[in-house]
Image (cartoon, grey):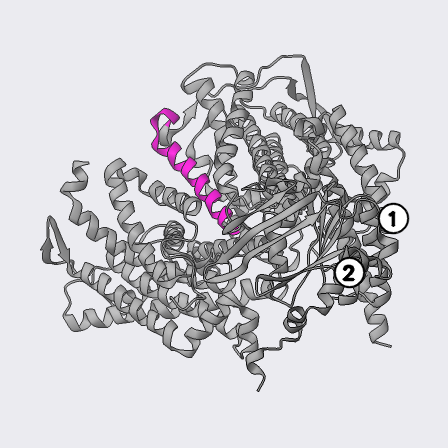
Amino acid sequence: MPEDLTQTQQPGNLATRASGSATGTRILEVDDVTLRFGGVVALNEVSFHINEGEILGLIGPNGAGKTTCFNVMTGVYQPTSGTVRFRGEPLGRRKRFEITKLGIARTFQNIRLFGNMTALENVMVGADTHHRTGVLSAMFRLPRHRVEEADGRARAEELLEFMGLTKVSGELARNLPYGDQRRLEIARALATKPKLLCLDEPAAGFNPAEKAKLMELIRKIRDQGYTVLLIEHDMRLVMGVTDRIVVLEFGRKIAEGLPAEIRDNPAVVAAYLGVDESDAS
Amino acid sequence: MIADRFKSLPLAVRILLWVLVGVFLFALPLLNIPVITTPDSDFGGVLFTVATYVLVALGLNIVVGYAGLLDLGYVGFYAVGAYSVAVLGSEHGHLPWLLTVPIAVVAALVSGIILGAPTLRVRGDYLAIVTLGFGEIIRLTAINSDWLGGNAGISNVPRPPSIEIGQIPHLDWSSGPPVVDLDTTTTFLKFGISDQIPYYWLALVVIAAVVFADILIKDSRVGRAWEATREDEDAAELMGVPTFKFKLLAFAMGAFIGGLSGALFAGKQGFISPGGFPLLLSILFIAAVVVGGAGNRWGVMLGAVVVAYFPERFREFQDWRVLVFGLALMLLAIFRPQGLLPPRRTIRAKKTDEKLEALEEGTTSA
Amino acid sequence: MSYLFDNFFSLTLTGLTLGAVYGLVALGYTLVYGVLRLINFAHSEVFMYGTFAALWAVMLLGGRSGAGVGSVVLWVLAMLAAAMVMSGLIAVALERFAYRPLRKRNAPPLIALISAIGASFVLAELMGLRDKLAKFVGLEVVLNNYVGRARDNAALPEIITPKPVFNIGDYAVTNVDILVLIGAIVVMVFLDQFTRRSRLGRGIRAVAQDPEAAALMGVNRDRVIQVTFLVGGLMAGVAATLYLLKIGVTRFDAGFTLGVKAFTAAVLGGIGNLRGALLGGFVLGLAENYGSALIGTEWKDVVAFLLLVVILLFRPTGLLGESLGRARA
């Protein structure tokens, strides 16, 4: 089919066609979602889906609604109309931590680590998502506490190593250099054992070398079996690492497709450059 | 720092040091050390009061220091505990003190849940005012309810059970060096009316148990969840922390400990009345936590000692107590907001901030 | 229940008069909270000092009952001036010494609250210890009328003899009632206009909504905050005068209960909302009276606290919603 041919002609993408990409199972469906804040329409009948195992890019000019979309998907906002379905089931009015337990995790545009906790502790909080230790188990050091504590610590250390943060695991999160903080956020999100990982501008503030490393990292994450949703402004990064792209503008989806298609899509170009037909005088 | 040097000692030495500290604390009222002993009031009684404040501070520390919730009505839980003991043991029943205590702490716990469930959804500074309102409602209800003894209060509150094992003498310093005074003794273990020292000992045991539990709970998923919630509640929730549940848990545990302290107080006092639970007490409790260092269990215990001991030690300045206290709070807020013993996070953060500043200054002044 | 109906009008009128006082004091809380997100615990003492200033002004001028209208007017104006100056001064001093240092250090809200509580105690105790303080400087005899028996009630000479002017239902509305209500309303209207029309008023609203943007627009944040405290203090001074005329006594700790109630009124109306503060005051005054008629006067204070708790739980934005920032003052 034509799309497949175009895909294989993309340099770099050959190497990243690892397991689980575009299996056809839809892990997330955003179905005609509209979100209104008073008179402002932040999202307008947005529909798209994410296939299990793929890396989907969500792009658009500032204010397009990308982070708002994240927020709807993670339960921070309730859509005014429309549904979000995760693995076939609507999210409904679930609480945020329940959605995290279901399997959607995220990072933040402005880093929101637990500053006065160490890197290890930050990740362990994520690992606690599926734990059930309570006051009594903790107070009497019951087996549940000991097992979960060991498991959480092991998982946290493993993730820190995966992110290259082992050396700073005992440092307070607020004292870490910027790059480490971004990677720590990802580690923390991964600790919650998500099926879908949403990264909100993970490369903001990175230099090209760091961005390249980040692309590697994202691919490695996908190769481990996670599905990734990525908001990014850096076009090279988006084109280079994503399998598909969804474009938003003013709360509407204006395009969806493979990176090459999106790059050449006039509507997308216009959205970014702000060319308004009526201005052409 | 002291804490680090202490931790580096071998376990056996650490245990020995703790035992020595424990023995000293138990012996303290008997030792009658000159400067420390309070001239105008019974030292045993003062120590007991300090102990109740320490217990309260530990409980409030969970609410304010660990979970980051502003509670200005903590005296309410203290009162629930005290009144439960009084009502079940004297006014409307004749249960022995030991049986009333579990009921009292459960009552306090339940009241904590009842208060917390609706209010913890509310914004931080509003929570402070709601809790203040709660404390006052409890007090005013006690004043206006005859079945709670009304304004006059409840007397003949049962005391802890006594057994008489032996007499322990005090030290006498009136003629220079300390001499064992065989005439002034404390009966071990009699919870009577005049000698307050056994109550103090009982309180010490309770404090030890609570500190143990505190250490174990803080170093677990529960403690982490509290810290994460306090740092950034929304982010914590998105990282899978059921923040509301843990906030309510903190509140309930704080209430439990507050009620326990109230039950001890009632057992010693023998008589309680609404006048013993004013708003000022809630403020003093908060002050103990803030002065000592919110979030650090040793800090808040020290804070409680400061807040409870000094007014008793300097009773002759009674009239000026509140004024000095207010001034101290203002100065503390400006010059040492983190308290006397800030929690490790602030110390570490400060140290690293200092290092960073030094680095920056090094480069900029070049 | 029948008590409520029999005395409906007296309950309503006294509720409104006291409510007017609550509302004026509530303005101080709501203004400061709107601009600083700080609960100014010590505002109750700002009010209390105003009452004493008004009292002392009358004593100094030899106020007594049975004097001519001209004298009475003079005394009331003196009360007003003294109270407003005193309350304004205390409020500005509070901002300067208790809160500004914390603001400059970015202190967390708990610390600001601690400082506020400390300041409240210090101010109240200074008034409550004025006899002992006077003794230190040897002035206790000279100033005895003003500083003696510092912890007791201090009574205002009855310069206005309450005379019934007209009747509503069972209640005889007195000249004092009219004075209080009209005085309060005049002041409220004035303040309303001030925040909506004047430059300073707009500045206050701007800082409340977005301090950084306001600063970028050339609004001097420090100055606006100072003015906010001052205005709150002036309003408390007016309230203090009216309170003293109506109630007739004051005390070093008169601020506390009234302060909590005024704060309740502010929250009730929507904290940050000026008109809400005034509305909240009236609602609280009425609710208190009706409530205590239904369940007994000894429960009057409980009604206020209960109302506070209930409002914060079920409608924390208050009756008119928080909106100092938005144009709806």
Q: Is residue B345 above or below residue B162?
A: below
For numbered disc 2, what is the local secondary structure?
Answer: helix
Quadrant for the N terminus of chain C, please: top left
- Left of C241 or right of it: where is A113? right
B126 or B362: nearer the eye?
Answer: B126
Q: Which residue is mark 1?
A: A166
Q: Which residue is mark 2?
A: B353
For numbered disc 1, what is the local secondary structure?
Answer: helix
Q: Are marks 2 and 1 in contact (CB under 8 Å)?
A: no
Q: Chain of mark 1?
A: A
Three-letter amino acid code at the position of disc 2: Asp
Q: Is residue C152 magenta?
A: no
Q: Residues within 10 Å of mark 2 (few under 14, many from 20)?
A: few
The residue shown at (43%, 35%) is B138
Q: Is residue B17 above or below residue C320?
A: above
The residue shown at (79%, 31%) is B18
A252 or A122: nearer the eye?
Answer: A252
Write down the region rendered in magenta. Answer: B125-149
Q: Is residue B143 magenta?
A: yes
Residue B295 visible in the shown view: no
Residues tagged by mark 2 and mark 1 found on one chain of the structure:
no
B87 or B247: nearer the eye?
Answer: B247
| Residue B145 position within the rendered picture, expressed as x and y whole percent measured from the top left | 35, 29
Q: Quadrant of residue B215?
A: top right
Give the residue at the far bottom of this rendering. A281
| Residue C264 position within the rendered picture, expressed as x and y whole percent measured from the top left | 39, 51
Q: Chain of mark 2?
A: B
